Image (cartoon, rainbow, N blue to C red):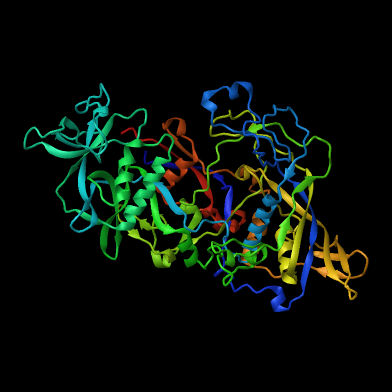
Amino acid sequence: MGSKIKKGDRFVNPYNFVSLGEACDKSPFISPFEQQEKTYTGYFMCELITKTPLFIPNTSNNKALHKAEERNNDNLSDSSSFEFFSYTNLKGQPVQNQPNYEPIIPGSEIRGAVRSVHEAAFNGCLSQVTPDKSLHRRTMDAKLAGILSFDEKEKKFKIQPCERVMLNVKKGHPEGKYVDKRNYREGEKVYIKKSPEPYKGKQNMPFVVDNIEKFRKEEDWLEGYIHIGEFFPRKHHESVFVPTGATSCTVAPEQIKAFLELLQMYKENEPPHEGYKRYREELGEGSINKIPVYYNEIKENQQTYPAYLSPANLSNEIFHQKVENLLKENGGYQPCTCRQNVCPSCALFGFVSKKASQSLASRVRFSDAKIEEKNGQYFKEPVVLPELGEPKPGTVEFYTKRNTETSGETRFWTYDYKTNGKVRMKLKPTDLTIRGRKFYWHHKPKNTTTKYALTNMRQRIRPLKENQVFSFRVYFENITDQELKTLQWALDFNDGNCAHKIGRGKPLGYGSVKIQLKRLVTRSVSENGEWLLNQYEPDPNCIGKWKHQDTEEQRDNRVVETTDQRDEILQIATFCQEIKDIISYPKGKVEGAGKNSEASHQWFTLNKQQEKQILPTIQEELSKNDDFHLKELYKISAKRSQT
């Protein structure tokens, strides 16, 4: 890259985080009956109003909106298009210009959104995370070359440091002797003569192979090992790894385990890299022949050791810190797994444990939401969504904050280490703070009808129109007065300006829905043993208060006390006029970088080269205080270096 990096327009990332408290509020589960508390059984009658277009797929037909020419296109064999969810089975049905089936919003969609709000507002666990999930991130740092082998005597894996020598595999290329790589296999031992003068085009691989044989021709020929990397169209050289004679370094077992996991990721790529199949097989058996690998070095307690083994120079790194360990060290917010340690949200919504006896049934049930006005004009015209990636928690500058008191200042960090240059220094879990729980800003989606064509990465959908009204019920059973209040807050925020996010396309602006409570019905038993229904209407003068339908009785279901977390939820759940037009994924541009010159990943690459921008907090994004302007995010652009 060129050294000149420019900042451009401000943008607001589509998501931000509601912070965690000091510690998750967990305690042994005791039923209300055991506590002899008064409990309530009944339901809320609710309305759901779509504030932006909404999309939830009917998966009974994943080609429902394909055009005729797209159905017969082999290049689109893995492409998808979906109608909106309904009770209609669409398998084998032709495309309709404007379908008249009634849209349905599954209760599970609403339940998931409401539970997420409840967990964030009332200090629950992060129930939706996968505790043992590995964190990873692609790094552009060039790695060291080495030969990995197993020392039978010491029963340890070791790496022999190597020099990389370029091997010409493209006819007509002027540097080095051309070889047909089809005559060689990955990791094969060869003997080479390298060029006497360095090749000027590669600083980290300056010499090229002048000659190569499978058997040693003369004593001064160097022993090396072929490394054939992944294919890309303009590739002209592979590598030969030549041992340098430096002392071999022991590789820790956890590094080998991470290497195996990374190789599995390569296997699952499309197309997979078959050259690494032998690595997986031999490593899995616990002993290997000599194979070429890339690696980095990490420093811990004044000692340096090899880490982050990879089959590619520029590659993903599998971090050793697991999500569960980070959540434990950041207040015990890992998902609940037993009845002796239950957060308020799991106590209400339930959870499943590996031990069935430790699972807890939900005391809340959500019905499907059904459209109220049966006019048949529910849907917008089909649109093609741009590519939407999965969450990438490896972007630590957005998902974490550094504890500079323990870790010190640094320009770049991961879940495992920090670096101010070439030296990587190991971090402890307490050196990082998890940013919190992800929520999306509300904004109107941009029209994508004509901008995008259907591909295997882009889906065509038929969204529901905004301002459509649905009705549904939320049933509750044997919940306490406090639980009733927290459930209501999670439904309507006790604030008429706030909305939830459900369905697909949330970062693009889809899926903003407002829930309004229309009636509260509780069930009780009279002195004669008869069931009585107590019905309450919402007080028009105060959200959260109720009036009995037949008596003067009133209920106050408001959660009055405030917390930082509840304030942050209200801020991000409100439609904000100041930022709605500048919400987008990070904007990066590298002039001269081809079709990928302007893409989000360019922003992260350029951001690493300068004083790093990190994700502002919700408050910082919304504040008009001049001091916060220094923390806003801006587009980054640069020119690609010509050397």
Residue 323 point in image, percent of width and height: 47, 58
Residue at horizontal 67 percent and vertical 32 percent from the top: 91
Residue most toward the right?
550
Residue 282 point in image, percent of width and height: 29, 46
Quadrant in the rendering for residue 20? bottom right
User: Taking 432 as reference, is 580 left or right?
Assistant: right
Residue at horizontal 38 percent and vertical 47 percent from the top: 262
In-front residue for pair 269/243: 269
In-front residue for pair 16/415: 415
Residue most toward the left?
219
Quadrant the N terminus occupies: top left
In-front residue for pair 584/279: 279
Quadrant the C terminus occupies: top left
User: Taking 402 as reference, is 559 left or right?
Assistant: right
Residue 625 in sight: no
Residue at horizontal 57 percent and vertical 72 percent from the top: 340
Quadrant in the rendering for residue 460? top right
Residue 589 in sight: yes
Residue 436 point in image, percent of width and height: 55, 59
